[in-house]
Image (cartoon, coloured by chain):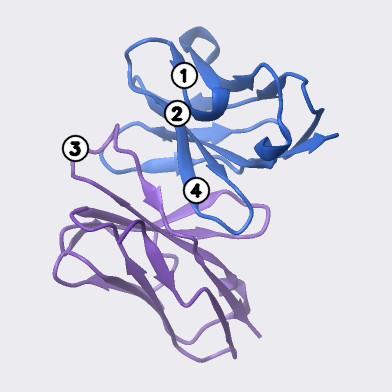
Chain colours: A purple, B blue
Amino acid sequence: GAGVSQSPSNKVTEKGKDVELRCDPISGHTALYWYRQSLGQGLEFLIYFQGNSAPDKSGLPSDRFSAERTGGSVSTLTIQRTQQEDSAVYLCASSLASGGRAETQYFGPGTRLLVL
Amino acid sequence: AQSVTQLGSHVSVSEGALVLLRCNYSSSVPPYLFWYVQYPNQGLQLLLKYTSAATLVKGINGFEAEFKKSETSFHLTKPSAHMSDAAEYFCAVNNYGQNFVFGPGTRLSVLP
């Protein structure tokens, strides 16, 4: 694919329901990031994958949040028992390799989550 | 700990005027610094980055930024604003590993 894709683009759910957000990174990119963007806020780091491993889960806000990556490609962010404060835009980004500090991240368009 | 501040959540300029978006960072080690732009309903894309080479960095669409260690700043400028520059701009810092910290963003409006 040409870029990072995310699905769904919009999700409306009821409080207490579980949601799954999907990210398809650029082919060949080994690093994958999840961020949360709340209204008027910057990007809040959630989790980072190198291949299928997540060496840094420090940003996950609670144990209701989890993420996995399979085959070094697609990643799913799951939010269990959603709360209204989970409403935000969830952004996924990928980068070519580890190496870290100078990496350019390529972002998807985001999933806009609204919890009623 | 590293952090990024962006002075002014919203900046308005006239078309053709100078664009100046401010970014200050805190870092205990030499940082790597980035500016990303987010157009409406699109993902973020990289404008430019500083990785300890030249302190004046040129990016896409006529933007540039200057790293000033003494001021812990990495302000973004463009000599002449265009209507298509209207977007949200994010400054980010990376001090170590994969830990990218983004600022809160500055929304740029360009007035005709």
As helix, strand or loop, the secondary structure at mark 2 comes to strand
Measured in 3D between alpha carbons, the distance from the residue under mark 3 to the one under mark 2, in whole angstroms, is: 18 Å
Q: Which residue is mark 2?
A: B48
Q: In whole angstroms, how far apart are the C-alphas of marks 4 and 1? A: 18 Å
Q: Which mark, by number, is residue B44?
A: 4
Residue A32 falls left or right of residue B31: left
In the picture of the structure, the residue carrying the numbered disc 1 is B58
Element on which disc 3 rests: loop
Q: Chain of mark 3?
A: A
Q: Is residue A90 above or below residue A14?
A: above
Residue ID at (18%, 72%): A70
> In the displayed structure, would residue A52 be above or below residue B24?
below
Instruction: Please name the amino acid that badge 2 sits on.
Output: Leu
State if disc 2 and disc 1 touch (CB < 8 Å).
yes
Q: What type is the residue that disc 1 sits on? A: Lys
Q: Secondary structure at mark 4?
A: strand
Q: Is residue A25 above or below residue B75?
A: below
Mark 4: give few (<14), some (14-19) or many (20+) Cα within 10 Å: many
| Place of residue A114 in the rendered image (x, y in percent of width and height, measured from the top left) | 61, 78
- Residue at the farthest right position: B112
The residue that mark 3 highlights is A99
Query: Which badge, 4 or 1, comes first in the chain's sequence?
Result: 4
Residue A43 numbered mark, or none: none
Question: Distance between the Cα atoms at labels 1 and 3?
Answer: 23 Å
